[in-house]
Image: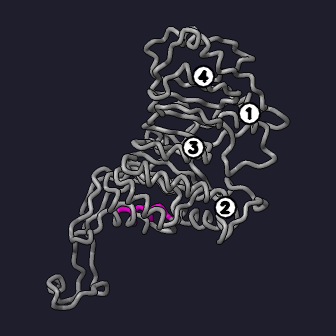
């Protein structure tokens, strides 16, 4: 159900829900108009009232809620759904603002959204395989303590932005192409009230640490895909902890504190199952955050040939035990808004000049030099690397899921 607005389309789906005995996937996408205007015209219990009367429960394995603003009646709504059956759950632009983004000037939906945080005691709690959300709260972070077995966690960066002024609203949500953090203009201006402190964690870093603790301690062993918010730049110690606790990651998207591709030496030797990795531009607020983003963006805008050459070499370097690194599953590397496709191993002849030779004359390769100092050829092991567009990776989950699209 997409773009549902009860003032424009007073449709009643309660009968369909009552008789849809094989219903497995429910995606409820509401027009963002209600949330933009703080209007609680959606009554969820109306959708489920016939199920409640018939004492039936939907056994839905995939559930998605988009742009919802409605007062909740936990007893009625949850009695109509077997929540233990839900394995894939999405909630975008619903249930309130990010906890670390809340300000007194943006509280039009605050009290309504807080009704969804009322605890509902259940003996059997859901054990999701996939969670995709854009608005983060301590309550959700604590829920991850009980999410052992989680395989796909997408903490979405895309945000719904109302269009127009003076109450006009947006009737569409951003697509996948809007998810990639872009250069510094995307960040708030220097007038932001956020300040960094060396002694007191900011709300953002406090929430980050709470999430990361539960991701590493509980979900890590089974995680396959992970998208982290770009406003959470991860220091090397946190990255090291993450890759040790989540060795089965195949896709990773995060803002890593880095200014060159040395980060690949940290990730790739340990996450050998990686299929795609995406380095996001940091968007943390405050002077320190803006400094990190400027450094990263300068790195991103370095010549493409430089990035391609470094990636080609880094992904084919000799390992510490003398073997050759080979990452047979790695296919895509994203750096900011740029993307490279990683191909197979190749060997290219390179010329080694006498002036570049650092080995002694006793070395066998030195003896191969001609008497007149002519350059010799040597085969260099590389990976094939090709620059592609973000459109070419729209099917890859760390790009596809980092959006407000109904999926």
Q: Residues within 10 Å of mark 3 (few under 14, many from 20)?
A: few
In the picture of the structure, the residue carrying the numbered disc 2 is 202
**Residue 195 quadrant:** bottom right
Q: Is residue 376 above or below residue 144?
A: below
The part of the chain drawn in magenta is 303-312
Q: Is residue 392 visible?
A: no
In this view, the mark in front (2 or 3): 3
Residue 192: horizontal and vertical position, in percent? 76, 59
Circle 2 — which element? loop
Does 278 sit left or right of 250 as displayed?
right
Residue 389: horizontal and vertical position, in percent? 48, 47
Q: How is the image coloured?
A: one colour
In this view, the mark in front (2 or 4): 4
Q: Residues within 10 Å of mark 2 (few under 14, many from 20)?
A: some
In the picture of the structure, the residue carrying the numbered disc 3 is 140
Residue 174 belongs to the span the image colors magenta:
no
Instruction: Look at the numbered discs 2 and 4 and tell me whether their residues touch, using CB distance below 8 Å.
Output: no
Alpha carbon of mark 2 to alpha carbon of mark 1: how far? 26 Å
Alpha carbon of mark 3 to alpha carbon of mark 4: how far? 19 Å
The residue nearer to you, when weighing 63 against 34, is: 63
The earlier-in-sequence mark between 3 and 4 is: 4
Alpha carbon of mark 2 to alpha carbon of mark 3: how far? 18 Å
Disc ID at residue 77: 4
In the picture of the structure, the residue carrying the numbered disc 1 is 112
Q: Is residue 145 above or below residue 204?
A: above
């Amino acid at each position: 159900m997409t773009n549902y607005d009860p003032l424009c389309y007073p449709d009643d789906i309660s009968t369909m829900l009552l008789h849809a005995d094989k219903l497995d996937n429910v995606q409820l996408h509401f027009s963002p108009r209600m949330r933009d205007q703080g209007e609680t015209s959606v009554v969820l219990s109306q959708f489920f009232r016939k199920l409640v009367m018939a004492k039936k429960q939907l056994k839905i394995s995939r559930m998605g809620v988009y742009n919802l603003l409605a007062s909740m009646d936990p007893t009625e709504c949850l009695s109509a759904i077997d929540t233990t059956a839900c394995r894939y759950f999405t909630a975008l632009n619903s249930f309130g603002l990010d906890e670390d983004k809340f300000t007194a000037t943006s509280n039009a939906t605050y009290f309504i959204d807080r009704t969804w945080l009322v605890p509902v005691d259940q003996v059997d709690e859901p054990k999701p395989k996939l969670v995709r959300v854009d608005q983060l709260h301590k309550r959700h972070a604590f829920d991850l303590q009980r999410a052992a077995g989680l395989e796909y966690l997408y903490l979405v960066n895309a945000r719904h932005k109302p269009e127009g002024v003076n109450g006009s609203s947006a009737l569409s949500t951003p697509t996948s192409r809007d998810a990639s953090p872009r250069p510094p203009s995307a960040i708030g201006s220097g007038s932001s009230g956020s300040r960094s402190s060396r002694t007191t964690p900011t709300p953002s870093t406090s929430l980050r640490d709470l999430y990361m603790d539960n991701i590493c301690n509980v979900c890590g062993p089974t995680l396959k895909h992970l998208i982290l918010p770009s406003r959470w730049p991860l220091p090397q110690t946190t990255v090291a902890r993450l890759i040790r606790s989540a060795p089965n990651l195949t896709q990773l998207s995060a803002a890593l504190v880095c200014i060159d591709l040395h980060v690949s030496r940290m990730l790739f030797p340990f996450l050998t199952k990686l299929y795609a990795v995406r380095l996001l531009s940091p968007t943390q607020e405050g002077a320190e955050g803006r400094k990190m983003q400027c450094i990263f963006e300068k790195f991103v805008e370095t010549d493409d040939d430089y990035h391609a050459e470094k990636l080609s070499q880094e992904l084919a370097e000799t390992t510490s035990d003398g073997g050759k690194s080979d990452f047979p599953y790695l296919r895509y590397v994203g750096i900011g808004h740029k993307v490279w496709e990683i191909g197979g191993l190749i060997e290219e002849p390179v010329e080694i000049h006498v002036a570049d030779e650092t080995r002694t004359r006793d070395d066998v390769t030195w003896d191969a030099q001609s008497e007149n100092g002519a350059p010799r050829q040597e085969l260099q092991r590389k990976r094939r690397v090709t620059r592609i567009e973000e459109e070419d990776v729209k099917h890859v989950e760390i790009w596809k899921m980092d959006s407000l699209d109904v999926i």
